[in-house]
Structure formats: C-alpha cells, structure tokens
Amino acid sequence: MKSVIIIPDRCIGCKQCEIACSVEHSKSKNIYSSVFETPKSAPRIFVLPGDHSCFSFPNKCRHCDPAPCLMICPTGAIYKDSSIILVDPTRCIGCRMCAMVCPFYVIRYRESPDIVERYVATKCDGCIDRIKKGNIPACVETCKTGAILFDDLNKILKEKGLNFAKKVFLVQKEGKKIDVLQEKNCYNMLQELKEKLYRTMVVEDE
Amino acid sequence: MMKRIVILGAGPAGITVAETLRKFDKTSEVIIISDEPYPPYSPPAMTEYFLTGKAFHLWKGSNFIDNYLNAKYLSGKSKRVVEVDPESCRVVLLDGEEIYFDNLVLATGSRLSASIKGMEKEGLYNFKSLSAAEEIMEKVREREAKSALVIGAGFIGIEIAVLLKELGVKVTQLVRSRYMRGMLDEEAAGVLMHIMENKGIDVLKGSDADTVEFMGDPDVRSVRVRSGKILTADLMIAATGIRPNVEFLSGSGIKVNDGVVVDEFMRTNYSQIYACGDIAETINRITRQRVVYPSFYNAVNQGVITAYNLLGMNIRYEGADRINSIKHIGIPLITAGDVDSKDGSSVVYKKGKGFIKKIFLKNGRIVGFILLNDITNAGIFKRLMDRQVDVSSYRDRLLDENFGEGLLYRSILKIM
C-alpha cells in the first residue's frame, strides 16, 4: 500500500508543493488561469519553518487511523475512502470541531466552489483523482529534493535501517569516531541533496 | 457465542458505541432503545437543520441502523426504560416489555435542569433534544411566536437565541453573570455579548436577568426576575443547564453520584454494565478530578472506548475534556480547558484586528485556551494541553504565525 511519506530532513522550504497542490485543487488545473479564479484555490499542504535555521517541515494530513476528525464530525461530512480521509463540502456545517481536534492543524476553513454561504473544512484529499488515473500526488511529483515520497512505508523504513546499519558497521570496522546519531546540519543536508540528485540522474541514465 | 448488547439511548454516545462495535464484531445482537420518536440524529447539527431545512445534516439517515449497524431499534415514548435489574440482567420498558442482556450500555444523555420556582409547569420550552426543539419550531412556523425569552447564556442558550433571531423572532436573552461562564473569561464573554447584541438580540444583565420564578397558571406566561420586573414573551425557553438522566437507575444498585460513576474502562460497579456520554461521571484528563462534562466530543470519545472494552480490548479512557467550538455566531470561537483560574497561571495573549487569542499556562504547561476569530493551531494547543507538554522553552512563540508542526515535530520524536 503506497502512501505519501514526508522526510523533513530533506525539505529545503521551497514551497513548490504548496503551489502544485493549489494548482491541482483549482478548477482549471492551470497555474496561470487558477490565479483569476474565485474562490481562489489554496494549498492543503503547509511548509512551516522548523526549530532552527535551515529547517522546514511540510505539514499535511496524515490520514490517521482512527482519525479524530472523522470521529468528531457531527454530520458525517468527513468520511473514509480506501484509507484516505475526505470531506464532503455539501454536508459540512462549518462547526470547526475537526479543526479543534486535529492534532496537526491541517484542516483549514475556506470558501468552496460548491458552497457559497459558509466556509467549509478543506483538507488534503491524497490527490485521490490523480491516483485513480494512475498518477502520483501533485506534491510528490513536484518535490525536487525527495522530501515528499509516494512509496511503501515499510520499504522506506527498511532502506533507512540499512543505511544506519551501514554506518554502524563502518564505525566498528575502521574505528572512526563518527557520531552516527548526530543531528543533521545544513552541510549534511546539502550533501544528501547532492547525493539524491546524483542518484536520480544515474537511475535516469540507466 | 452470540452476545446480546443492549444500548439505552441513541444519542451520539449510544450510536458511536454501536458503530465502533460493528467495525470489529458483525455477529453480536445489538438492540438500541431510545424514547425519542426519531431515527438517531446529531444534536450539533440541529441548528443547521432548522435554518436550512436540509435533513441530511442530521447525521447518518434512517436506513443507517438497519443497513450498517444491523441493529434492532426500539424508539418512541412507550420504549422508555423504567427499570434496570443488574442481577438478572434485564431491563423493563414502559410498555411492559422485558429485554435480557449480556452487556448493557447506559447512554441516556441529559436533560434540562434548573432550580427555579415553577420549573415543572407546562409551556416552558428547551432546546436539548430534537423533540423539544420541534415543539419550539412548530410555534415559530405557525407564526404563533413573535417574541422569545431565552433564560440562560450557556452553549445551548446561545444556539437557540441565534437560531430564533435568524428565523425572524424577536429574542431577549437573560444573562445572569456573563456568556458561557466557566468556558470564557470576561474579555471574550464581553466580545461575545457585543456580537449577540449586534445580531439584534436584546441582552439583559445583572438583577434584571436573575430569574426567580416562572409565573402563569397552568402554562408559563412570564418570569419574575430578582429586580422585581416581570418579563413576558410568546415563547419561554429555558437553557439554564443540564443534568444527567439517571432517575430510572434508582434502586437498581448501580452507583450514581452526580452522574453514573464509571471506572477508567467506562464500567459501572457492575462489570457487565457500561455507561458513557452525558450521564457518565468520569475524570478530568488534566486535573484528575471526578467530573460530568456533557459535550458531543466527550460523548463520542467515551462511546468509542466503551465499544473497545465491550470487545474485550481493555483500553483506558484518558479523561474528559472541557472543550467546545461555538457555531453560528458568525465567527469561529474555540475554548478549552480551565480559562478562569486565578491561582498561579500565566497568560500568553495576542489581540489584533478582529481576533483575540489567549493561552493559559500553569507550571509551563497549557491548561486552557481561547481562540476568537482566529483558530490557528487550535488542535496543536489541544495536543500540547492533553499531553501536558512543557512549553516554557517556546512560550513566547506559541501565538506566532509560524508556530506549528515544524517547531514541534522533533520534540515529539524525542517523546516517542
């Protein structure tokens, strides 16, 4: 089961995912004409600054299970479709209870093209339309640094575990004093970014 | 073995129990008993339903019980439960029907309460249930009621006052001390009063609003307030508070204090009987005191935990929260936790054009917050409050625009 996975260490805060998300959820799905739409399309992913410089964090719906927003919704406007939590704007009464219980604050209240009289809950829909067509979500497609991936979580965890094991092995073998648990600084991040770019280029060449 | 689970009450708590049960257990027999003559509905959506007339806001519809829950639904006045016998595992209904159970869930909710003279008289309306609300709406639809007097300024009082105003009724509201006492501080309550007055609702305060007696015979026609004035209106609506429906439990042996006393697994003193929702007396998540907090949020959470424990999962309830979001006043307003304490709490405060945000801290931990017209990070504050995370290192940044997940995710990783 593939899902959107965020690796915050790789995010450089370029906010291109916000733009892509916004365009994807506009009526025309075109970056130029979407600017002139009313209501204006807005992103459902939010890139926030991190706890120290050179850090940012793409914050989006985790599609929790069990989902607190789905449990609290008094009208059944929030529902689940194949492990993705969705909002039906016509049923939403704008009570803000889901925003109250969402522990990540990723449900925002906005004008919807279908509903004029009130603000309704708007959240990440996992790009369900794109996935049904066989595409990957817009934020994943646009991410240049590999901070947002669309993959099997277990596979990513396995990769990460192997990398860690490799580092531990190196320390033991060469007796090098590398603090494997050290927090990544900007330099390490850029190194990783370069590596990542290099790796994708190699894959493409093959 | 097939179990028979009987749920008393088809409010948010009772229906959540049945719904969560059915996710895991498709075979047990579930019987839901309600004295409301309607299919299960959602109380927070009542105002929306009467404003727009769209019935689909009222939760999951009538075929939900048969198709999804696959439960037997007994409803109507004659299905009121008059006796619960825990020893022989049976409940007796008003029409004499006896139902035996393996597990019983008490979720009968609450009703209007007041200690005012003349309370028991006819002609006093309330907005606690759909059947009570329909009585009000019938009067409004037939144009019999041109003016209304709302006694009380709590959550329900605000909702019915705004609803009647929107429907073109002249509304007078009696506010004894301030709006939503206990859930709003003085400043926010003042703003709320300003909003209500701007909507065209007459707000009476102080001794003009302290109801002493309901007058009229046999129906209530007017109220006498402490200042001596006599106020009258076509519709008298009481929103003076609610109390748990526990009267039918007297003599059954089930322990009742303010509400039905339950342990952390939502069990009463009989292990086969559970209680949840407005009638359950649980503990406060933060202060660990025993409380009855009737709200939709707590009812749903307790319903889920009850269902898990009925299934034998042994999951603890973390405690009830005092949190709510006020609808229909035109602006979002979320209030949570203890916002009125005087002892040793400090306040992080931000006021700007059209919004007020306040966070109350004690020992570097969030104990309550009020967000008026700007609900940024409401859920995040709730999370920090629930877990009692020490926020003193980023105290001053709490109300920054950029505060949020980015700043927190690392510290959360450290906790886990």
Image (cartoon, rainbow, N blue to C red):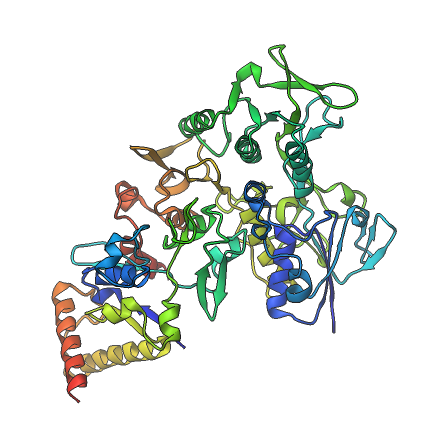
* Residue located at (83% from left, 50% from top): B93
In this view of the protein, which residue sits in the foreground, B124 or B404?
B124
- Relative placement, left or right, of B91 versus B380 is right
**What percent of the width, then of the height, locates residue B131?**
69, 41
Pinpoint residue B83: horizontal percent, then vertical percent. 82, 48
| Residue B81 place in picture, x, y as percent | 79, 48
Residue B348's place in the image compared with B193, above or below, is: below
Q: Is residue B165 left or right of residue B88?
A: left
Q: Which of the two residues, A190 or A138, is positioned nearer the viewer here? A: A138
For the image shown, how many numbered marks are present on the structure?
A: 0
Residue A123 visible in the displayed image: yes
Quadrant of res B236: top right
Quadrant occupied by the N terminus of chain B: bottom right
Q: Quadrant of the C terminus of chain B?
A: bottom left
Residue A31, percent from left and from top? 23, 61
Q: Residue at horizontal 40%, vertical 27%?
A: B187
Residue most extreme to the bottom: A206
State the residue lying farthest toward the right.
B96
Res. B19 image quadrant: bottom right
Up the image or down, A49 lies above or below A137; here it is: above
Residue drawn at (56%, 46%) of the image: B45
Q: Is residue A6 visible to the viewer in this orientation of the structure?
A: no
